[in-house]
Image: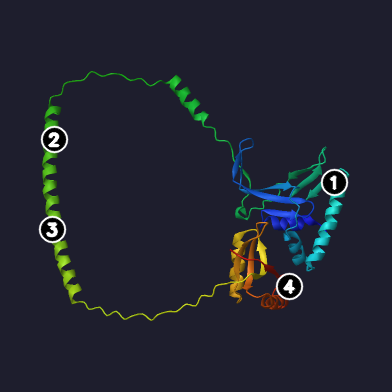
Amino acid sequence: MQLESFISDLLYRYECVIVPDFGAFLTERQSAFINEKNNTFNPPRKVIAFNEQIQNNDGLLARYIADVEKIPFEVAVKKIKKRVKILKSYLTEGETITFNNIGDIVFNTEGKIVFEPSYNLNYLTDAFGLSQFESAVVTRDVYKDTVEAIEETAPITITLEKRKNKGYLKYAAVALIALTLGGVVASKYYVDQIEAHNMLAQEDAKQQLDTKIQEATFSLNPLPAITLNVTKQTGNYHIVAGAFRIEDNCNKKVAQLKAEGFSARKIGANRYGLHQVAYASYEGRLEALKALRNIKKTHNKNAWLLVQKLD
């Protein structure tokens, strides 16, 4: 079984994909950036890293393999263990393991895993359709050099002319000032007339509005009362539908189950940080077991019972 295809599928949707007893592939969003060495513009992407310290089985990879290959969850777990054993033997022998579109893994001289990510595939769905492109360098110094060369060959000279006394300019300036003052006075008189007219119009409109309001009769009929029955989920026995690393997926699952008629709700995160969704919660154990058997038979064979007191 080739694990890389299943891991690659999950990296699109999750930030952490754990291979039990081997390590975890982690993703981190990287903003778009410019490579000044080769003048390329790179879109935002998910950068992949590997941490061999995270090896606990969170069930994500096994459950996905079980769904894709239509096999029981336990069988998928055994297949993963078998494949991990083979991969470790390859590493011990000094070979490099290549996960297509993910990266290469090899042991260093100290026996530690070294991971070299691959950038052939962008796992960030928000950047779908965006690709790297190259742009020519913009050289702004060329224009500066051209201007400097022109100034050297044809410098700009400023010559001072002798001012001649022209008496008629003085009288023209006096006439211009007089015309300006006359225009300002006339303009002020016109504006005052417009404001007075507007005030009279507003007063007349206000009186007409008051008259209409006094003549109007309003009949307000009381609205019928509405009674809402809200049932609060209680009990320490919870039938779990699934656990999700991303809270948005948890909310979508709750909405889906409610649309199908279940009293679904979120019951908090578990110790692995996964957001849990319950079909319903019950006060009694026998009632919860009866509901669990019915759900496993008709809706979800992987549902299970959680006994926990919620805050």
Alpha carbon distance from label 1 to label 3: 94 Å
Of the numbered discs 2 and 4, the one sitting upstream in the chain is 2
Of the numbered discs 2 and 3, the one sitting upstream in the chain is 2
Residue 303 x, y percent position in the rendering: 70, 70
Of the numbered discs 4 and 3, the one sitting upstream in the chain is 3
Q: Callout 3: helix, strand or loop?
A: helix
Viewer-nearest of labels 4 and 3? Answer: 4
Of the numbered discs 1 and 3, the one sitting upstream in the chain is 1
Of the numbered discs 1 and 4, the one sitting upstream in the chain is 1
Viewer-nearest of labels 1 and 4? Answer: 4
| Residue pointed to by mark 3 | 197
Residue 140 x, y percent position in the rendering: 51, 32
Residue 97 in the figure: left or right of residue 126:
right
* Type of amino acid under label 4: Lys
Alpha carbon distance from label 4 to label 3: 82 Å
Q: Nearer the viewer, residue 16 or 53?
A: 53
**What numbered label is drawn on residue 91?**
1
| Residue pointed to by mark 4 | 301
Alpha carbon distance from label 2 to label 4: 96 Å
- Quarter of the image for residue 272 reads bottom right
Viewer-nearest of labels 1 and 3? Answer: 1
Q: Callout 4: helix, strand or loop?
A: loop
Name the residue: 64% across, 64% down.
276
* Type of amino acid under label 1: Leu
The colour scheme is rainbow
| Residue pointed to by mark 2 | 177
Name the residue: 75% across, 48% down.
53
Vertical side of 90 occupied by 171: above or below: above
In contact (CB < 8 Å): disc 4 and disc 3: no
